[in-house]
Amino acid sequence: MQERKNSQTLARKIYLTMSKKGLLILSTLFLSSQTLIAQDGGNDFMRSMGKMYVVVAVIIVVFVGLIAFLVYLDRRLTKIEDQISENE
């Protein structure tokens, strides 16, 4: 009985410390997002310098590369699966 009580007390302490840390992290994220929203001119700067289009182009190239790699990997795995099924 005493052991169960100690484990419940320990679990309660762990829960309280985890919830305090979670609350701290959430409040930090909330405050930082408010600061980022409050800043003006961030989007205009990227557009005026033409760098926004470079970022979009890089993201598109990365996604196209990932899709091409996945298609290549799928074909290769299908080929290996066919070889395994033929050998059985």
Image (spheres, rainbow, N blue to C red):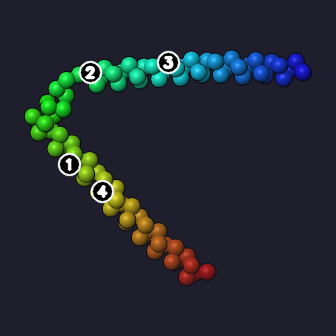
Does residue 86 appear to the left or right of 26 in the view shown?
right
Structural distance between the alpha carbons of marks 1 and 3: 37 Å
Does residue 72 appear to the left or right of 62 in the view shown?
right
The disc placed on residue 38 is 2
- Please rate how many residues cluster around mark 3, counting C-alpha atoms within 10 Å: few if below 14, some from 14 to 19, many from 20: few
Q: Which residue is disc 1 drawn over? A: 57
> Quarter of the image containing the N terminus?
top right
Secondary-structure class at tag 2: helix
Q: Which residue is disc 3 drawn over? A: 24
Q: Earlier in the sequence, mark 4 or mark 2?
A: 2
Q: Residue at x 53, y 23 (%)?
A: 22
- Please rate how many residues cluster around mark 1, counting C-alpha atoms within 10 Å: few if below 14, some from 14 to 19, many from 20: few
Q: Residue at x 26, y 21 (%)?
A: 38
Disc 3 marks a residue whose amino acid type is Leu
Looking at the rendered structure, the number of numbered marks drawn on it comes to 4
- Please rate how many residues cluster around mark 2, counting C-alpha atoms within 10 Å: few if below 14, some from 14 to 19, many from 20: few
